[in-house]
Amino acid sequence: MKIVDVRATTVTVPLQAPLRHSNGAHWGRFVRTIVEVEADNGLVGLGEMGGGGQSAEDAVRGLRDYLVGHDPARTEALRFMLANPTASLYNNRTQLLAAVEFACLDLQGRQLGVPVHELLGGKVRDHVEFASYLFFRYPAADGSGEVRTPEQLVAHARELKDAHGFTVHKLKGGVFPPDYELECYRALADAFPGDQLRHDPNGAWSPEESVRFAAAIDDLRNDYLEDPTWGMNGLRRVRERTAIPIATNTVVVNFEQLAANVRDPAVDVVLLDTTFWGGIRPCVKAAGVCETFQLGVAVHSSGELGIQLATMLHLGAVLPNLSFAADAHYHHLTGDVIAGGPFRYRDGGIDVPDAPGLGVELDRDKVAEYAELYRELGGYPYDRDPGRPGWYPLLPNSDWADPAMAGPVDLGGR
Ligand code: MG
């Protein structure tokens, strides 16, 4: 099998409502790039990456010179061909590598007639558990979907739990003053006494604020506190002062950092992201290191459509030491580009696909519809808050959003 073409299509899929985070927001939609890698036998492998537009599509097409003629089964070689560790100082292609790796694994699976998890050692579970990923949300254009108060947060979590069966709840914080988010977090604990909880303020707090927050939630059923502050040294200072496990998806995202964390621990749990780490296979390798050193492992979500969700499911399927529920933004989307409609949650998780390759096919009508929506709306600045024009956070943040400020906000178009 040889690669004959590489294609990229930017799509925009609407979210139920804009999702707020410590740096800004997802402005009511996700922009993603669908990557298709075609082989000389007519098979097409699927990949996906975050962001899009002309520059992203050009970057994908720019890989043709590297990939045309390459056997997609030679997956390990891609790491050196596209993202050589020394050359990467100049070309930072990790996310491109990930999208191509997904597509090459998909091609191999399709050719052999086996699911990707069989190429990765075989599944140890059929069903991957997910957390209800809860965000503070601005209202959608029709006024629905706002999550700002503890009551709205609990109602939203209950709705998701009823619909999908979640028993783990992750709150994306770092938006409002820490004491207000503490009130919200404790409201979740009161509403769902048997469920597990996690809070992730995306590194927005000082180490001292993080220690104070940790002490205030110490009596709850916490999976972990995720990136309460930034940097390995800050996290290490927090970890030394709390019994709550510390997790990260920001400061252990490659093998150098993983080694540093083993030598001088700063976090207990590593959230593996199939995009940030450059593919599914690096995540499997990293999970092996974590198993050796008894570090916890979870699956991170960087905002996915069905193709990337499939990579997360195959990853989750093969990790014996997946000790926590995975994360997904997926249930905030209003649609998807895959045939048969979005993946469905069942009992708080999603069944691992068993069809050949990643187990997903494109719905070409949906791709066309969402590509048109991208052309209509354009991109959005992820690190800008549509409700606070001109604002950007300091680290540690000292200028929180006002919990009394209700939407709507101007999400504009291009
Ligand atoms: Mg995080």
Image: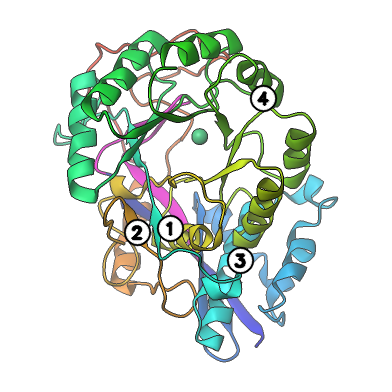
Looking at the rendered structure, the kind of residue marked 2 is: Ile
Residues at marks 3 and 2, CA–CA distance in whole angstroms: 24 Å
Read off the residue under disc 3: 100
Reading the image, the residue beneath label 4 is 231
Marks 1 and 4: in contact by CB < 8 Å? no
| Residue 376 visible in the displayed image | no
Give the number of callouts: 4
Q: First in sequence, mark 3 or 1: give its number.
A: 3
Nearest the camera: 283 or 391? 283
The answer to which quarter of the image holds residue 24 is top left
Q: Which of marks 2 and 1 is in front?
A: 2
| Screen quadrant of the C terminus | top left
- Callouts 2 and 1 close, C-beta under 8 Å: yes
Q: Where is residue 251 in the image (x, y as percent from the top left)?
A: 65, 33
Q: Residue 309 carries which label?
A: 1
Earlier residue among tags 2 and 4: 4
Foreground: 215 or 313?
A: 215
Is the CB–ligand 1 distance for label 4 below 8 Å? no
Which quadrant of the view contains residue 260? top right
Q: Tell which circle, 3 or 2, labels the residue nearer the N-terminal end.
A: 3
Q: Is mark 3 on a helix, strand or loop?
A: helix
Instruction: Say which of 298 and 234 sits in front.
Output: 298
- Neighbour tally class for label 2: few under 14, some 14-19, many 20 plus, Cα within 10 Å: some
Which residue occupies the extreme bottom position in the image? 41
Q: Distance between the residues labelled 2 and 4?
A: 33 Å
Above or below, 366 relative to 324: below
Crowdedness of circle 4 by 10 Å Cα count: few (<14), some, many (20+)? some
Disc 2 element:
strand
- The image shows residue 287, relative to residue 108, as above or below, that is above
Helix, strand or loop at disc 4?
A: loop
